Amino acid sequence: MARKPTRQRGEIEVRESGSLRVRVYAGIDALSGKRNYLVETVPAGPKAAAEAEKVRRRLVNQVDEQRNPRTKATVNQLLDRYLELLDVEETTHERYEQAIRIHIRPLLGHLPLARLDGETIDNHQAILRRCRAHCDGRPFVEHVTDGPHECGTRCGPHVCRPLATASIRKVHFCLSGALARAVRWRWITVNPLDQAEPPRGSTSDPDPPSADQAAAILNAAFTDVMWGVLLWLAMTTGARRGELCAMRWDRLDLDRAVLTIRTSIAQRNTHTWEKDTKTHQQRRIALDDNTVSLLRAYRQQCEQNAAAVGIAVAPDGRIFSADVDHSTWLRPSSVSNRYARMCARLGWDMNLHQLRHYSATELITAGVDVRTVAGRLGHGGGGSTTLRAYTAWVSETDQRAMKASGVRMPAPPITGADDLALPAPTDRPDVDHPYKRIAADLRAAITCGALAASDPLPTVETLCDRYKVSAGTANRAMALLKADGMITVSRGRRATVAIGT
């Protein structure tokens, strides 16, 4: 390889193949401390020398304008430095590290930062959307272990499962934070995320238990009083599982019916510790009369159990504890696992966090304003999180507001489904329960064509007023029609006549 001398900055080297290698000194590497060069190769040809000179001037201008990368560090090296300086809670740091270790390092870690561009990041997201195992789409057998073994039922053909949208966004946030720091440190001059398409927003679709399911859950839970009270508070307060485990007797004022939540129990593997709440703010939650009465009875039972063994309940003890003196807290994972097992015995696949959704949806559908609901749940952003997560129920409450007696609107020129001439309530001997009577009358209206396909049914409030029954009775009538396939019911929306009925 011969070096072509030049009086100007930079070097142009003639290689054995006839190509020209342009190299310009760009300072000291910010990470390794070694000399850093910008290097580019020009293919051999009759105009190679002129092209090489253009490349040299361009690279020199990049150095002069400080537009050149200051390091040849890889993505892995950036991520190591990013995690080292990341100032977040321990559990959050662990989730970031897990997302980086599983979904970023295997695919992008070996690349130099200077080679990371928008197309590479878009391809990376496409792989995650196709398969969380990062397969190439070719069929292969997925084994239960990598070592020698005899394949059993747990080994079989690989089935691609896309990574959840929320998880893809978490990976994107990790890359965003690391690359933003790389730009500030001048490791790179342009953030490649600005050239890539951001992942689509995740759609919140809370799936809380129905009223009947909630009643069944409480009936099953109260075979153990402590467990039943814990789930009752989860439903009525909407507290997170770590907050439930951290609740203390000295932060419960039964005379004023107020529960103060200041801390939460965090867990990593088997290690648990007490920390601030998720939003780092305390909140005071008002309790209803039923909850206060239940907590008084529960406290009395706890004191009796402690007195039976000659000790007393600690004044600052945990409300829920496996110890008689309530000196220790419950492990969050054990609470979640117990709830999931109990629901599985009832025939449902549920998790404890859905009780938080249940509390929010019941408050919103009862007409409580979103700001108050956000305060009880501990949502940040002044209620914006609550609005994003529970839009369907806010919509239902908005519909109820238009039917309130205080809202003055002109009478419509036509009547709606609520004013349909349903058959008058009867005392037929074959309909011995009010909910069956309501179901029979609605079934007759659908059969005769008074209610056509996709027409909305009368609201629960209308049925309650007409038949002088409770909302639960009206809902049972709807359940009968739904079981017969005559109506379509979904939470947050008005029931309609099923198509094809």
Image (cartoon, rainbow, N blue to C red):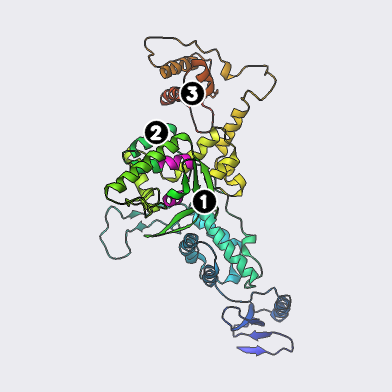
Q: Amino acid at mark 1?
A: Thr
How far apart marks 3 and 2 lie (CA) works out to 33 Å
Would residue 247 be counted in the magenta stretch?
A: yes
Residue 246 on image: x %, y %: 43, 52
Of labels 3 and 2, earlier in sequence is 2
Quadrant where the N terminus is found in the figure: bottom right
- Label 1: state its secondary structure: helix
- Residue 437 is situated, as x and y percent measured from the top left of the image, at 43, 15
Lateral position of residue 26 relative to residue 376, left or right: right
Decide whether residue 239 is among the magenta residues.
yes
**Mark 2, residue position:** 215
Asked if the residue under mark 2 is in contact with the one under mark 3, i.e. CB atoms within 8 Å, the reply is no
Mark found first going from the N terminus, 3 or 1: 1
Residue type of the residue flagged with mark 2: Ala
Q: Report the front residue among 191 and 304.
A: 304
Mark 3, residue position: 500
- The answer to which quarter of the image holds residue 303 is top left
Taking the spot 54% from the left edge, 24% from the top edge, the residue there is: 454
Image location (x, y in percent) of residue 240: 47, 48
Which of the 4 image quarters holds residue 223?
Answer: top left
What is the crowding at mark 3: few (fewer than 14 residues within 10 Å), some, or many (at least 20)?
Answer: few
Please indicate, yes or no, whether residue 349 appears anywhere in the rendered image. Answer: no
Residue plotted at (51% across, 37% down): 361
Q: Nearer the viewer, residue 160 or 42?
A: 160
Foreground residue among 162 and 298: 298
Residue labelled with disc 1: 165
